[in-house]
Amino acid sequence: MVCSAAAALVQVGNAIETNYMVPLMGRRDNDSVTSSGEVKYTFVVTNTGEESINVRIVGLNNITWMSEDITPQINVSKGESKVHTFEDDSRSVRGSVYSNQTVMVRSDGYFQLQVFVNDRGYKEGFLGIPQSYLNNGPVEPFNASEYVTSTFCANGGYCQFAVSAFVNDTTVSIKFPHSVPFNITLCKQKTFINSVDDPVITMGAFDTIQFESTYDLSGVHIYSFQPIAVFVGSRNLTSRFAHTIEQLVPSSYWGKEFVVRSNAVSGYGDIVKLTSSWNRVKVSMTGFAPFVISNRTEVVARRIDKGTLTHIKASHEIQVMKVTGASYTRGYATNVSLTYVPPLEAFANVTKGKCYDGATTKLHIISTQTRSELPPLPVINTTLVPFTSVYEHVYEILQGVYNVTMPSPEYMTGILQCDTAHMPLVMRNNQKALLSPLVQTEVIVEVFERACREGFHGESVYNETTRNISAHVLDLNATTMDDDIMMLRAKVCGEGSLVFHTSSKSVHLLFSKFRMVIFECTSDHCTKPESTASWFNKKAGQCGDDMLMYWFRLINDSHLCYGEGVMPDKDDMCNDASLKSKLYNLTGSPTKILMSGLTASAIFNYGKVHVILLEVGSI
């Protein structure tokens, strides 16, 4: 590699009201040049102030070192959204590079910026974050900008992240995790910058650094005492054109509580990536055993099934990113999107904007409002988030322009979906809950004494030669269930088995993605098996890759209430009107549960949730 010298760009212009930095992350290899029309960049500018504003989209060129207007000045009236699209990809930053080439969007007033990237039909986008928000968040009030990257390129291609500076003499510290096993090198004038050196880089105003690798770049820690903008993404994921992009939110705006909906278009579901801001952060997540993120800036991943609505609570602030469009097989993902999920502490009473022309627009809004209390917009679905008093409302806006106002004093948060592009509706943490109390149903997560290991809690072993099964044993004398709900994820090939042992008999519950069978045995005989068809796991994925979801509850120490799915419905707890759950008389308190796979080794991830159900109004 040869490093060439380059002049520094002097910061120009007076202070302005609103200023966004938008480095165009490269969609091709270093030596590839795209022609006009291959890559389209769409900027949606929405006036959020009280007066008309003028907006400039300015390109900074690394050859002439001068600012250049990409578009004539745009006048935007109060409350109006205007769209500008350009098809010049020559300004994109390619490969791992130190560059002066970026785009700035600036105005003499307040406005919201949404950016969409269309690479031959593969569409992705992000919500811009203005300079004034980048180093004054409520969680860490000292003037610093801290970020942790979260990327996805498991289906192929390159993971990327970019850092842009707003002012001269911006010092940026970058620490790579050990999961990146090789050195990434780029040049700054005549100096090499190596990722293995945990570089500290001094940047000029409007400079951009981009790193990319075929390895996942999640967990890179980026820190500066000056305002910086950080972007993550990927390119060439499943073809030459599939890509992701998202502007990261500083850690000072992270939160403790989230609602995540899987908008997957494939049977694989979505991937949720959680990043910790502290050591030993305890996390509860609907459908999973409680777990601990051990180290600060550590990133862990969970897969959620298509259509699943997941509630996440953490003991300290975390970052949640969602990957939509992934697949089981490398090279076979659909349009992939990477999205920052806003915490429930980030909310507003108004959300407005626009998708690009012709896009199908959906708003996934989280609010305390019931459907009857919503503004008069076309709601296609309303769902009560399990064990909370917040609702998810899905709006479909045919014309692409949206403007939703909640009646005072109500607020909302959520995700915007423009075809395959996803982005948050809001990002600023208000350092208070969306409502108080946030959760009307008391949910207290109690972790078993044994620490929950990453990926599983117990394992049964199947010996193919002898056909003997070594079951995983849960001792209920040491870990009582009381009236709590036990959540179970079982990774099995074929059928799995749960055996509840009491002092006089054993109750056998066999399960697969097609059915559930229950029977009991004493010392001299077994009863006739009772079978019920599966309703939740019927569309599970390939054998060996799917996680089957179940829940169990002991009632009065002697009756086993059980069902399929992540958690029981609020009105489906083995009462007289129950349709999906089943009740079985154990005629005694169980002392242990044996968990095993019947034809292969199996993995079990389980945990219990103590729940006091309160009456919640129907939708």
Image (cartoon, rainbow, N blue to C red):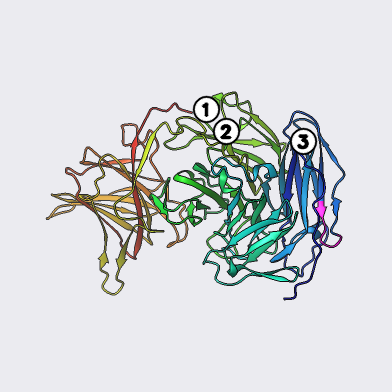
Q: Is residue 63 magenta?
A: yes
Task: Tell me, yes or no, if residue 235 can be seen here.
Answer: no
- Asked if the residue under mark 2 is in contact with the one under mark 1, i.e. CB atoms within 8 Å, the reply is no
- Residue 127 x %, y %: 67, 45
Q: At label 1, which amino acid type do we have?
A: Thr
Q: At label 2, which amino acid type do we have?
A: Met
Q: Nearer the viewer, residue 573 or 61?
A: 61
Locate residue 93: give its quadrant. bottom right
Residue tagged 3: 109
Magenta portion: prevailing SS class: loop
**SS at mark 2 in the image:** strand
Spatial separation of the CA atoms under disc 1 and disc 2 = 12 Å
Q: At label 3, which amino acid type do we have?
A: Gly
Q: Nearer the viewer, residue 529 or 357?
A: 357
- Asked if the residue under mark 1 is in contact with the one under mark 3, i.e. CB atoms within 8 Å, the reply is no
Q: Nearer the viewer, mark 3 or mark 1?
A: 3
**Does 89 sit left or right of 607 as displayed?**
right
Residue tagged 2: 412
Q: Earlier in the sequence, mark 3 or mark 2?
A: 3
Q: Nearer the viewer, mark 1 or mark 2?
A: 2
Range drawn in magenta? 59-64
Task: Tell me, yes or no, if residue 89 can be seen here.
Answer: yes
Locate residue 92: give its quadrant. bottom right
Q: Is residue 60 magenta?
A: yes
Q: Earlier in the sequence, mark 1 or mark 2?
A: 1
- On the rendered image, what quadrant is the N terminus found in? bottom right
- Residue 425 x %, y %: 63, 39
- Residue 589 x %, y %: 18, 44
Residue tagged 1: 370
Mark 1 burial class by Cα count in 10 Å: few <14, some 14-19, many 20+: some
